[in-house]
Image (cartoon, helix red, strand yellow):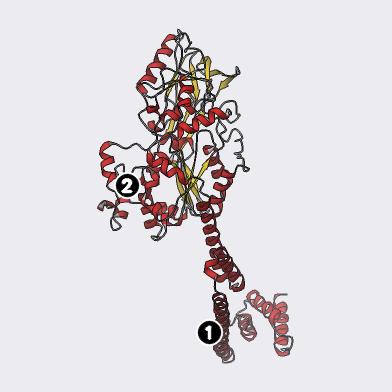
Amino acid sequence: MTYKSRSDRQTPGVEINLDNREFQNAWNLITNTNQSVFLTGKAGTGKSTFLKYVTANTAKKHVVLAPTGIAAVNVGGQTLHSFFKLPLKPLLPDDVEFSSRRLQKRMKYSTKFVKLLKSLELIIIDEISMVRADIIDFIDRLLRHYCRNPREPFAGKQLLLVGDLFQLEPVVTADMKLLLHRYYPNAYFFSASVFKQIPLVSVELTKVYRQTQEEFISLLDRVRMGVPTADDILKINARIAKPTTDLRKEMVMTLATRRDTVEAINDARLKEIRRPMRSYEGIVTGEFPDNNLPTPRTLQLKEGAQIVFVKNDYDRRWVNGSVGKVTKCLPERIEVTLENGTTHEVEQERWSNIVYEYDERRKSVIEKEIGAYVQYPLKLAWALTIHKSQGLTFNNLIIDMGAGAFSSGQTYVALSRCRSLEGMRLLSPLSPKDIFVNRAISEFSRTFNDEKLLQDALRRGRRRDNLQKAATLWEQNEYAMAYDKIREVFTDEPTLLANPLLDRFIRAKITRLQQDTQATIDCLTTQLGEKEALLATLSDEYVELGYYCLEDGQELTPAIANFDKALRLTPDNVRAMIGRALALIEQREFHDAMDTLLKAQTIVSKKDKRSIEIIERAISEINRKLG
């Protein structure tokens, strides 16, 4: 069997519509500030596309994390718990196990991982609506502690939080809820205490790309917000399947609230097909936990079975969520016919299980693959749970709400999976009680696309950037340019420079600093001159000792040693070079002597006629003896 990896095919470029104001706002915040951002939006507004655009285009060192294994695999990242090594229990603010004194001993982070944390500039968390408030506060505590920046939220690092609170909510058991209630009004991530210290700027994407019917989009929006009209309920219930409706036609997906309902539908429909079953074994190498596998490790198919694709095709023949029918099912080959009637051979795909590491040599964050999974990107799917359908889109849909919705946003997720109202059928009437939204979510949503919060964040980003540039210029002694950057800060925040006396005061300080700096430079220059004079005196003494040894007829080795000491103190001492060369000639080390003389010849002053004459005479003598 063969599969196509990312390297075998050209990955399509990730593009977004930067004419979309919300995309612009989010990108400006990420690029020009360290402000933590919540990117949200109704179904089909491009949250996942924007996330891919950010990871492909940002210059910031970043990691991509998600609360579940499959979500992490789908975004090409790592789970929150595996990255931060988070305990599975509630992480309460006053838990002594994680006090400041015990934190390092409890977490046991390696030096390499701490370097990775310190290097990060941007932490992206997808499906943030499933993350609890205590986890966000614990991440804040870890970053402040290990990055040695206890004063700034998240140690000054930027968080990009992506998801829709109206679709998925955190899983909180009854006993967990009791524990968390002592510290938080609710379990949602936005209730984390850290967001009381720094405002979370929320950008909501509003343009829907999944559906095109304005009336249907408006209906879904009211369902999402938990405020459907009586007419909305009537329109939805008008789609209840009549007894004569054929619900078993091809290319129709059923969404149900319960997993056992989904399994029963898929098993029954598969058994109805009187054709041989084929099994395709996925291949796991390295580390790849079973609960992170995007498809069954043993994929069982029959010709005629309905499937759903679980990965986008790089050749864009299908997308994650496309429905099809298996038309050929051979040991080494699978063909699928899509809803549009086209038939394609499906190749195996490869998924990576990665961890993030810090590369010391390149000073960058790298992805390290620790495991891989190869399998056909297919699942048997006449039915899916509403939860598992999140992020997918279908043309024809049957919705089975069973005994009714049991979690906030569940009905909205089910209805918004369909491209049109006409494409859906309900097995039972929808009750207004099936459409509900937690009040905390409704209140928090009032902060979405707040222009004041956005502009304040951008202004803080400009101030921070200018102050960093000013600090760099200051270190480079570019005081005037540093001052200009500081002035830009004051211009952005006029209240800081309301009094012209402050302007003159700062200029006076800078002038005084320049004067003090010049005085320091002059003093150091004088001291350096004195030191050089002292070294020259000592060097001359060694030269005299060297010539004394030569004239006294002593051994030549002490003479050379003294000349070498002189040259170490003053490398351009011509007299020391000549003396050294003469001693080497006596020792018949002609080549070393010649090298020394030639060097002396290049630096001797033209006015020093005596030294020039000695050098030339010595060179001639060496040439005669060598010749």
Quadrant of the rendered image containing residue 458: bottom right
Residue 227 in the figure: left or right of residue 603: left
| Up-down relation of residue 532 to residue 420 (above or below) | below
| Up-down relation of residue 249 to residue 348 (above or below) | above
Percent position (x, y) of residue 586? Answer: 62, 82
The residue singled out by tag 2 in the image is 184
Residue 277 in the figure: left or right of residue 463: left
Residue 232, disc? none
The answer to whether any part of residue 249 appears in the image is yes
Percent position (x, y) of residue 230? Answer: 45, 26
**Which three-letter amino acid code belongs to the residue tagged 2?**
Tyr
Q: Residue at x 59, y 33 (%)?
A: 8
Foreground disc of the pair 1, 2: 2
Quadrant of the rendered image containing residue 170: top left
Give the structural element (helix, strand or loop) at label 1. Answer: helix
**Which three-letter amino acid code belongs to the residue tagged 1?**
Pro
Percent position (x, y) of residue 67? Answer: 40, 39
Instruction: In this rendered view, identify the residue nearer to me: 93 or 288.
Output: 93
| Up-down relation of residue 175 to residue 270 (above or below) | below
Instruction: In this rendered view, identify the residue nearer to me: 122 or 387.
Output: 387
The residue singled out by tag 1 in the image is 558
